[in-house]
Image (cartoon, rainbow, N blue to C red):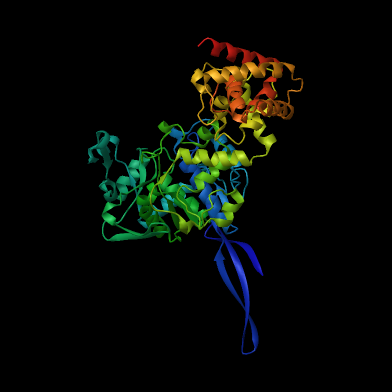
């Protein structure tokens, strides 16, 4: 029998599964218990605007790793960078997670016993300062009183690209301050930060599940800031403390954080805490192999929804940006992704965001969509084009299997509103054996039939025209091609001639056929 307990140790709730087994020794029954950590993952976005595709993928992978193992998925809001806070961004986070089905087990609105789940609220409790002061007492951190001018003097150029990249490598100046100097500075209210004292000799090795073992020289590890001068913790420090206190077992993030991992590990080591399992996701690039940016116009979840993509397709596609399933299947529901997802099958190489592939996938989802759900989404796009009193549901049914994104609807149906200007060369079709001259004759012949026809639904219309074709000894295409061209003015349409005529009705059909005859007569 498997049971789950919350075991409180060192101010952290440890979520463990107790697996009970029985064996016999000297004919006496013994119970053996193997303690295994319950998988707990977290998505920790910053409320800085719309959710980037990369952040959505992180949230998705984090969710899938947890749910694949029946674990917990935690939402934590990392708002330590108050300058970048965007009003309304929290609502965007909640709305995006809800729409995509990534339902969190714990979060600001679902207390699981390790809250608060918002870093500013945790900071208000003095949580991060307490742990930073502990590191100071241990000799693993120190107060730094260096002003901006001195820090500016430590800048060095490391790249000439885009005007040059400059970094500051701190020289441990304040590490050597005496106890008296520190106390005097603090008493005087001198602005300061708290820095971690990184080793300068040897190496640090850490393991990532995707990129393997990575070793870095300690001399490359800067004395990172733990607590800023405004009293807020840095992301680098807060995420370590919070991940530990919340019992996080797997940390999922972009590979841009690979270089920071050894610094995090030094903090874990200083506290004597277990290091979580790291899963760093590959970079997402655009079609030009540049980092996916806001400038491309489809970098966020909301961008894609506004552009006519459906949520399920976006989630499905994002799952494949860096992960490969075992077989050739490409279309996955969220439930199927939970079952199939194995993070060990993630790739190291960058994933290319192929908009064309996403459009194809979106088209597949639209085809499979319940019609009422489709119409609910499509109606607005149809009404932007069609003002006449037509059966819009019939029009929607015609385009459902022919579009990839909802804005495609407009160019598919605009001819219902009015016949566009077109070149009479469209009447020439080699396979149908039509040209402008014989098309004119066909339209003249068929016009009386259309005027006499009472029932303008598709089947009776088609039956009448088929009978006409038979009587004249024509091929179907010889009549239907000119007729479809006359009523649509387009080479490609989502429906045949009689389907179009049913929707526009008798009066409009006859008006359009007469206009086509006049157009051909005036050549």
Q: Position of residue 158 (x, y in %)?
A: 24, 42
Which quadrant, please, contains the N terminus?
bottom right
Q: Is 233 drawn above or below residue 398 in the view shown? A: below
In the rendered image, the residue lying farthest to the top is 522
- In the image, is 15 to the left or to the right of 343? right
Which quadrant of the view contains residue 184?
top left
Which residue: 71% across, 28% down? 467
Which residue: 59% across, 73% down? 33
- Which residue occupies the foreground of this view, 103 or 190? 103
**Residue 84 visible to an observer of this rendering:** yes
- Which residue occupies the foreground of this view, 193 or 68? 68
Which quadrant of the view contains residue 374?
top right
Q: Is 49 drawn above or below residue 509 in the view shown? A: below
Which residue: 53% across, 42% down? 361
- In the image, is 256 to the left or to the right of 336? left
- In the image, is 66 to the left or to the right of 503? left
In the rendered image, the residue lying farthest to the right is 454
Which residue: 55% across, 56% down? 340
Q: Position of residue 482 (x, y in %)?
A: 58, 23
Q: Is 142 drawn above or below residue 391 in the view shown? A: below
């Amino acid at each position: 029998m498997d049971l789950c307990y919350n075991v409180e140790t060192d101010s952290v709730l440890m979520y463990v599964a107790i697996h009970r087994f029985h064996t016999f020794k000297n004919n006496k029954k013994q119970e053996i218990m193997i303690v295994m950590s319950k998988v707990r993952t977290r998505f920790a976005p910053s409320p800085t605007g719309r959710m980037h595709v990369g952040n959505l993928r992180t949230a998705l992978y984090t969710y899938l790793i947890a749910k694949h193992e029946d674990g917990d998925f935690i939402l934590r809001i990392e708002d330590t960078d108050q300058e970048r806070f965007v009003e309304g961004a929290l609502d965007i986070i909640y709305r995006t997670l809800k729409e995509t089905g990534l339902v969190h087990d714990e979060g600001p609105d679902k207390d699981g016993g390790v809250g608060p789940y918002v870093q500013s609220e945790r900071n208000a409790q003095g949580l991060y300062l307490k742990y930073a002061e502990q590191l100071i007492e241990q000799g693993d951190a120190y107060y730094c009183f260096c002003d901006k001018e001195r820090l500016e003097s430590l800048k060095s150029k490391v790249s000439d690209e885009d005007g040059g990249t400059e970094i500051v490598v701190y020289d441990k100046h304040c590490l050597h301050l005496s106890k008296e100097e520190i106390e005097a500075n603090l008493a005087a209210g001198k602005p300061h930060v708290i820095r971690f004292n990184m080793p300068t000799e040897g190496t640090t090795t850490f393991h990532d599940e995707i990129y393997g073992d990575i070793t870095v020289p300690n001399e490359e590890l800067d004395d990172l800031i733990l607590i800023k001068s405004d009293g807020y913790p840095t992301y680098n420090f807060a995420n370590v403390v919070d991940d530990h206190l919340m019992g996080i077992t797997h940390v999922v993030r972009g590979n841009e954080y690979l270089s920071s991992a050894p610094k995090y590990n030094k903090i874990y080591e200083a506290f004597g805490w277990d290091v979580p399992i790291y899963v760093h996701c590959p970079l997402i690039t655009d079609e030009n192999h540049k980092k996916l940016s806001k400038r491309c116009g489809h970098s966020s979840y909301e961008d894609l929804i506004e552009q006519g993509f459906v949520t399920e397709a976006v989630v499905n596609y994002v799952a494949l940006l860096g992960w490969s399933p075992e077989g050739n299947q490409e279309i996955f529901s969220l439930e199927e992704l939970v079952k199939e997802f194995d993070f060990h099958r993630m790739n190291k190489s960058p994933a290319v965001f192929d908009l064309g592939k996403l459009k194809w996938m979106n088209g597949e989802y639209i085809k499979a969509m319940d019609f009422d759900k489709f119409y609910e989404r499509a109606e607005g796009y149809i009404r932007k084009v069609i003002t006449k009193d037509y059966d819009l549901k019939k029009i929607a049914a015609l385009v459902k299997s022919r579009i990839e994104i909802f804005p495609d609807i407009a160019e598919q149906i605009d001819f219902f509103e009015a016949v566009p200007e077109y070149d009479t060369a469209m009447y020439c079709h080699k396979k149908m054996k039509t040209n402008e001259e014989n098309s004119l004759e066909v339209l003249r012949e068929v016009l009386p039939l259309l005027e006499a026809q009472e029932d303008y639904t598709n089947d009776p219309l088609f039956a009448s025209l088929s009978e006409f074709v038979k009587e004249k000894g024509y091929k179907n295409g010889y009549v239907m091609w000119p007729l479809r061209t006359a009523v649509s003015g387009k080479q490609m349409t989502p429906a045949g001639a009689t389907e179009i005529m049913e929707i526009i009705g008798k009066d409009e059909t006859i008006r359009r056929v007469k206009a086509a005859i006049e157009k051909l007569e005036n050549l």
